[in-house]
Image (cartoon, helix red, strand yellow):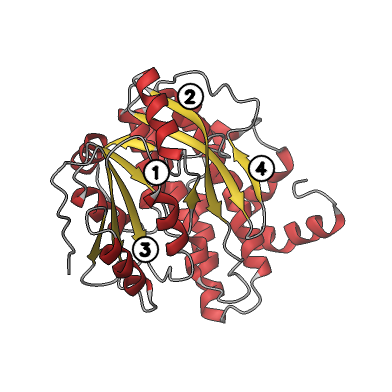
C-alpha cells in the first residue's frame, strides 16, 4: 500500500531507499535524512516484503512526517536491491534523486554540501566521499585523500575509476532523475543482484559532468555472512563481471583503458572466486559442483590475448591450468605467503 504525501510544494530532491529486513538500521538512516537542509526534499522508502519490523518502523516515521516520507510496498520480494531502488526512483517526484541504502547514513550538512557542489560545477552527478563503518568507527574508503576531488570529470572518463578496484564511491550522492529514466529506457535492465553494478557505469556513460563533494557517506560493513549462511549467491560477482565486460566492449573501443580494466577485474575476481570456494567448508557437494561450474564459466570469459604480459605471469599461468588445479595450488601459495597475491 502506498502512503501519499500531502506536501503542496514539489520537492527538489527525492531520497530513495530500497529496504529489506532493515529494522535494526533504517531508523538511523531516516533520522540522518529528516534533518537535512538546503532544499525541499522527500524520502521514498520501498519495502521489499520485509519479514521483520521494517515497514512498521517506516510507518511510524510516515505518521510523524507525512509531508516528508512515503512508504511504497512491493507486491512480492524481488530478491535484489535494484528492483525496489528502481521503483523508488520511478515514484520520486523531484528532479534530483539521492540514493541511500537502508543501513547507511549521512551527516547533517550532507545535502547542503552536495547541492552547493552541483551549483558550483553544473554537474549532473555529485558523489560524496565514502567512509566504511564497522559498527564502532569509520574509515575513509574512496576517493583517497590525494584524489583530485576539485576536478570536474566527464562521466565517460570516470568509469575507469570504478573498475578493477573502486577509486571513487558510487554510493549516495545526488543524480539528475532523468539520467536514471534514460538508462531504464536505453539499456536492458536485468532484474538481478548485479544490476546496480552495471547501472552505475550506465549512468556515468550518459553523464557529461560528474563532481565529488567533500562530505561523508557512511557505508555500514555488515558482518561477514560467509560462515553463517554459505550460498551460491556469494558468487554473484562473477556474473556481474561478465556483464561489465560485455557493457564496456559495447561502448568503448577495444584496447582502451576501460575495457582493459573490466577484463582485468574479471581475471582478478576469478581468483577471488577460487579463494572463496576454497574457504567455504559448509557447502553441499552439489553446491560445490555448481560453484566450480560458475568458475569454469568465468574462466571462459578471460581475454587471454589482452591480459598476456599485463597481469601477474604466475596468476596467468595458474588460470591457464584451470579451476581444479587453481583450487589445489592457490590455497597452498596463500598459506606459504604473508601476502594475498603471489
Residue 110: name its quadrant: top left
* Whether residue 155 is visible: no
Residue 73 x/y as whole percent? 23, 67
Comparing labels 4 and 1, the label whose residue is closer to the camera: 1
Secondary-structure class at tag 2: loop
Using the numbered discs, state the Cα–Cα distance from disc 3 to disc 2 in whole angstroms.
40 Å
On residue 19, the disc is 3
Cβ–Cβ below 8 Å for labels 3 and 2?
A: no
Using the numbered discs, state the Cα–Cα distance from disc 1 to disc 2 in whole angstroms.
44 Å
Who comes first in sequence, dot 3 or dot 2? 3
| Quadrant of the image containing the N terminus | bottom left
What is the crowding at mark 2: few (fewer than 14 residues within 10 Å), some, or many (at least 20)? few
At horizontal 51% and vertical 39% (from top left) the residue drawn is 169
On residue 116, the disc is none
What is the crowding at mark 4: few (fewer than 14 residues within 10 Å), some, or many (at least 20)? some
Secondary-structure class at tag 3: strand
The answer to whether residue 317 is left or right of residue 108 is right
Comparing labels 2 and 4, the label whose residue is closer to the camera: 2
Using the numbered discs, state the Cα–Cα distance from disc 3 to disc 4 in whole angstroms.
41 Å
Who comes first in sequence, dot 1 or dot 3? 3
Q: Which residue is mark 1?
A: 36
What is the crowding at mark 1: few (fewer than 14 residues within 10 Å), some, or many (at least 20)? some
Front residue (pair 56, 124): 56
Residue 251 x/y as whole percent? 34, 29
On residue 255, the disc is 2
Using the numbered discs, state the Cα–Cα distance from disc 2 to disc 4 in whole angstroms.
19 Å
Using the numbered discs, state the Cα–Cα distance from disc 4 to disc 1 in whole angstroms.
50 Å
Using the numbered discs, state the Cα–Cα distance from disc 1 to disc 3 in whole angstroms.
20 Å
Q: Which residue is mark 4?
A: 316
Who comes first in sequence, dot 4 or dot 1? 1
Front residue (pair 85, 66): 66
| Quadrant of the image containing the C terminus | top right
Amino acid at each position: 500500500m502506498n502512503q501519499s504525501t500531502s506536501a503542496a510544494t514539489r520537492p527538489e530532491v527525492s531520497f530513495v531507499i530500497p529496504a529489506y529486513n532493515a529494522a535494526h538500521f533504517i531508523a538511523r538512516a531516516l533520522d540522518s535524512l529528516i534533518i537535512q537542509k538546503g532544499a525541499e526534499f522527500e524520502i521514498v522508502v520501498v519495502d521489499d516484503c520485509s519479514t521483520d519490523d521494517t515497514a512498521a518502523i517506516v510507518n511510524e516515521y510516515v505518521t510523524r512526517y507525512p509531508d516528508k516520507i512515503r512508504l511504497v510496498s512491493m507486491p512480492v520480494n524481488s530478491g535484489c536491491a535494484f528492483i525496489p531502488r528502481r521503483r523508488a526512483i520511478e515514484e520520486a517526484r523531484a528532479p534530483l534523486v539521492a540514493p541511500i541504502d537502508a543501513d547507511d547514513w549521512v551527516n547533517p550538512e550532507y545535502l547542503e554540501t552536495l547541492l552547493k557542489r552541483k551549483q558550483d560545477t553544473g554537474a549532473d552527478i555529485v558523489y560524496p566521499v565514502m567512509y566504511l563503518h564497522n559498527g564502532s568507527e569509520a574509515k575513509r574508503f574512496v576517493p583517497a585523500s590525494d584524489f583530485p576531488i576539485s576536478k570536474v570529470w566527464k562521466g565517460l572518463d570516470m568509469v575507469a575509476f570504478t573498475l578493477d578496484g573502486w577509486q571513487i564511491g558510487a554510493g549516495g550522492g545526488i543524480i539528475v532523475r532523468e539520467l536514471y529514466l534514460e538508462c531504464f529506457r536505453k539499456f536492458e535492465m536485468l532484474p538481478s543482484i548485479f544490476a546496480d553494478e552495471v547501472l552505475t557505469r550506465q549512468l556515468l556513460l550518459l553523464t557529461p559532468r560528474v563532481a565529488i563533494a567533500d562530505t561523508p557517506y557512511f557505508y555500514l560493513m555488515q558482518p561477514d555472512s560467509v560462515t553463517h549462511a554459505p550460498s551460491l549467491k556469494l558468487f554473484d560477482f562473477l556474473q556481474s563481471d561478465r556483464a561489465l565486460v560485455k557493457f564496456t566492449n559495447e561502448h568503448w573501443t577495444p584496447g582502451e583503458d576501460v575495457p582493459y580494466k573490466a577484463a582485468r577485474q574479471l581475471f582478478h575476481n576469478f581468483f577471488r572466486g577460487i579463494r572463496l570456494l576454497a574457504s567455504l567448508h559448509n557447502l553441499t557437494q552439489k553446491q560445490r559442483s555448481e560453484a566450480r561450474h560458475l568458475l569454469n564459466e568465468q574462466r571462459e570469459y578471460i581475454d587471454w590475448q589482452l591480459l598476456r604480459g599485463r597481469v601477474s605471469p604466475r596468476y596467468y599461468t595458474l588460470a591457464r591450468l584451470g579451476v581444479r588445479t587453481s583450487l589445489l595450488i592457490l590455497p597452498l601459495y596463500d598459506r606459504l605467503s604473508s601476502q594475498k597475491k603471489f
